Amino acid sequence: MRFAVFSYLLASLQTIVTATSVQGLYDLVQRRLPGHSEEFVFTLNETTCANSTDLVNDSFTVATGANGSIAITGNSLSALATGLRRYLTEVAHTDVYWFIDSRLDEITTTLPRPNATITGSSIVPWRYYFNTVTFSYTTPFWSWEDWEKELDWLALHGVNLPLAWVGFEKILLDVFQSINMTTSEIMPFFSGPAFQAWNRFGNIQGSWGGELPLQWIDSQFELQQKILKRMLELGMTPILPAFTGFVPRTLTDVYPNATVVNGSQWEGFPTEYTNTTFLAPSDPLFTVLQNLTIVKQIEYYGNITQYYTLDQYNENDPFSGDLDYLRNVTRGTWQSLKSANAAAVWVMQGWLFTSNADFWTNERIEAYLSGVEVDSDMLILDLFSESQPEWQRTNSYYGKPWIWNMLHNYGGNMGLYGQIANVTINPIEALANSSSLVGFGLTPEGQQGNEIMYKLLLDQAWKNTPIDTSSYFRSWAQTRYAEGVSVPTSALPSGVTTAWELLRTSAYNNQNLSAGNAVSKAIYELAPNITKLTNRTGHHPTTVTYDPQIVIQAWNELYRAATQQQRLWESPGFEHDFVDVTRQVFSNAFLSSYESLISTWTASTIDSPPSTKETLLSQAETLISLLHTLDAILATLPQFSLEPWISSARSWALLNTNTTSFTTSTSLQDQNLLTYNAINQLTLWGPTGQINDYASKSWAGLVAGYYVPRWETFLEYLVSVAPEGYRDEEARARVVVVEMGFQKKRKEKRSPWRRKRLQYCTYGCMHERQQTNTTHYMASKYKPYP
Ligand SMILES: *[C@@H]1O[C@H](CO)[C@@H](O)[C@H](O)[C@H]1NC(C)=O
Ligand SMILES: *[C@@H]1O[C@H](CO)[C@@H](O)[C@H](O)[C@H]1NC(C)=O
Ligand SMILES: *[C@@H]1O[C@H](CO)[C@@H](O)[C@H](O)[C@H]1NC(C)=O
Ligand SMILES: *[C@@H]1O[C@H](CO)[C@@H](O)[C@H](O)[C@H]1NC(C)=O
Ligand SMILES: *[C@@H]1O[C@H](CO)[C@@H](O)[C@H](O)[C@H]1NC(C)=O
Ligand SMILES: *[C@@H]1O[C@H](CO)[C@@H](O)[C@H](O)[C@H]1NC(C)=O
Ligand SMILES: *[C@@H]1O[C@H](CO)[C@@H](O)[C@H](O)[C@H]1NC(C)=O
Ligand SMILES: *[C@@H]1O[C@H](CO)[C@@H](O)[C@H](O)[C@H]1NC(C)=O
Ligand SMILES: *[C@@H]1O[C@H](CO)[C@@H](O)[C@H](O)[C@H]1NC(C)=O
Ligand SMILES: *[C@@H]1O[C@H](CO)[C@@H](O)[C@H](O)[C@H]1NC(C)=O
Ligand SMILES: *[C@@H]1O[C@H](CO)[C@@H](O)[C@H](O)[C@H]1NC(C)=O
Ligand SMILES: *[C@@H]1O[C@H](CO)[C@@H](O)[C@H](O)[C@H]1NC(C)=O
């Protein structure tokens, strides 16, 4: 199968790319190491295009060639790209990174030649990348230049199976138009630019704050054409979308006899925006729509892949739990795929089995998967393998090929975090215990931070024993701060490696999964409250799973290193890490200061001395001042600031101000929609606070502009009721009500109670109003016109 994939990739390269197969690698070197491309010789040594259906592992060799070239040989383009990175990190001591760009351009002099041959062999044929939601949490506003860097990073890290969702709405629009639906019947189905992932999943429909612009659909489609072409050049097999069954509500106006069911409600969204209409796979129209979806993509992009992503029940429960019903759904869907592309493989995120575990009993999972009668026609992504793997309980998905994935973070939250043991030991164990495991991959909700963890798993895909993380972290620090060959790693201050060793053994070594099993969240990003902010566990933990003193020590080590070697302040990698570690130190400091304030508050009684108020006031001031200082620190780098997120969103409207078909006012309207979407995702998320703060970020502008006002309102209230308050029964009662939260219904008839409860509600309601207002305020701040 792999050989087959390879041969038609070559065929499509000839038709689409018109480049020799290794040209993509020379182009990569040209992009990242201009002037050095003639020093490399890439040789693809796999000439036999066997008709084998076995997936094969990749292998490469890097050596100094006879003519003095850096000779990289391998059996696939992905093998060659991985070999290139091994050369870069091990011989040239440089690498590519998120946020801070390629550091390769620092090699201005002669490239060093490898002294000895470097070899590498993958232990799994597939290295997968992306979560469907990464396309909304991280990439929705990316430009082509952003994508170019991303795709080079993926290639160099050996990724050969990326998800490719960009611009899918263009395909759907075409598909529904082909069955005689009008544009105005179709457009209201689509969600806003920052929320498309969940529309693609069928969780939501429609767009609040304004309808998706047609112009956005067209420009995203153009971007997708570039992305796919580049993926092929770099030896990746893109996974393209397929038809899931989710359709505009208006479909039944045009096809009154279509068999549809109302999907379930998602995350408390109003029915208007959820309960998405699902067309039964048994309806002949389903097959027509599937065929159109596949055929249109082949028409636009070429016959470039056999892999299709298709999720019908991601956080949506099926209409029925009947085993026959479930089996019929998959069988119908599978047959529709195969009739459209005989080679199709259905790729599915296995997340539903985790998120909706109550529904998905083993019996139902088995029934659902068995509808795909040929195992190799399906590929399951075990989505959160480091913390909540499902492959054991499902007996390796009852024989379907599957991929072991690290999810790592939810909503692009930003705490320093890793499970180094789970990510190195567990996949190797899985490989030994499951014969249908065919790949390792990464499924982050956001590509946001902790890059070392992502590199670690992708590197683990080329090593058959668990990587020694101690030396791995040491090399990371050395390569990252050595800045190419000009500075020998031995000349680096030891503080940088000590710092990373401290981080490795604390924040990156969570072994207590019941305290938190994914990236942690700073409590200042949450709606202020006197309860329930701390010690949260699970997917957005606020529990600190390590001794916070160790991260402070790491900060000190980094600081000391930079005082010893001033040039570190100019090193983008160092700057990034220094701000990031500082952010974590502030996050932890805020947490403990908050706990002090709450303990003052809780310990106070009617008889507390007046100094209680002063204590509370000064503790409140500490909290606010921590946030202001943090905001100023974050503002030193764009990757920790809100502004680039907003301006990249807006640029999608600006891009088209020249086109004659759109008036300037349309463009401004689009800018407002894009701005609203960008801010709404980080804050309220849904139209009225559904999954509020889920995708919160520690970004300059958001901290001072959104989190600070919320905390000020809250703290001012606490301080205002604290002092005299305890001197009379009424205020005492008021405090009790605060402690119980304003949702608690008080039945007492005592009027003071009721009056005070009302007052508290004034705080609560004001707090909610303020929150909504702040979102609008922030949106208006970025409005291009009043
Ligand atoms: C290709 O498949 C055919 C039929 O299964 C088989 O006879 C032939 O040996 C295979 N060729 C290679 C190179 O594996
Ligand atoms: C291709 O090169 C790789 C790496 O040098 C090697 O492992 C593999 O055996 C070679 N394959 C062939 C068919 O020569
Ligand atoms: C290559 O060999 C030279 C001379 O022995 C040595 O100085 C250098 O560190 C070696 N380079 C690598 C990448 O091993
Ligand atoms: C769409 O309308 C055209 C013209 O009325 C008709 O020929 C065609 O069959 C219709 N297509 C579908 C899928 O109903
Ligand atoms: C829908 O079904 C009804 C009743 O079975 C039938 O009379 C009608 O012709 C069908 N309409 C279409 C458009 O197929
Ligand atoms: C939406 O889905 C929920 C189940 O998740 C269901 O209770 C509700 O009735 C549905 N609403 C509509 C209008 O279908
Ligand atoms: C499943 O499909 C079979 C064959 O089409 C059909 O006889 C059966 O009624 C379907 N079962 C359910 C529950 O939809
Ligand atoms: C899919 O669509 C193409 C092009 O319209 C058509 O030739 C083919 O017969 C269709 N296949 C199926 C299974 O409907
Ligand atoms: C696309 O390629 C697959 C082989 O991977 C082949 O089975 C299928 O027929 C091709 N489809 C088209 C429309 O060329
Ligand atoms: C991850 O590691 C922890 C501690 O090392 C262990 O208790 C846990 O079982 C591992 N998790 C999984 C999913 O294997
Ligand atoms: C949270 O956990 C910490 C450490 O385990 C503990 O000291 C603290 O009392 C807990 N706080 C609450 C509110 O449970
Ligand atoms: C504080 O948390 C409680 C418990 O979760 C909740 O009932 C209450 O509404 C929250 N208060 C505010 C002001 O958000």
Image (cartoon, rainbow, N blue to C red):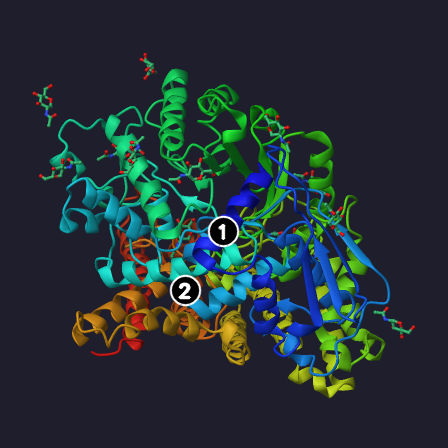
Q: Quadrant of the C terminus?
A: bottom left
Residue 637: x and y, percent?
53, 78
Most extreme residue toward the bottom is: 566
Q: Answer whether residue 545 is visible to the viewer in this image.
A: no
Residue 689 x/y as whole percent: 33, 54
Residue type at tag 2: Gly
Question: Does residue 146 sit above or below 734 in this rendering?
Answer: below
Across the whole image, how many numbered discs are drawn on residues?
2
Where in the image, quadrant-wise, is ligand 7 located? top left
User: Residue 434 versus residue 21: which sits nearer the camera?
Assistant: 21
In the image, is the residue at mark 2 within 8 Å of ligand 12 by its beta carbon? no
- Residue at 32% from the left image edge and 71% from the top image edge: 650
Residue 725, labelled with which disc?
A: 2
Query: Is residue 381 in view?
Result: yes
Q: Which residue is mark 1?
A: 532
- Secondary structure under the numbered disc 2 in the rendered image: helix
Q: On the picture, is 328 further left or further right than 657? A: right
Label 2, label 1: how far apart the Cα atoms are = 24 Å
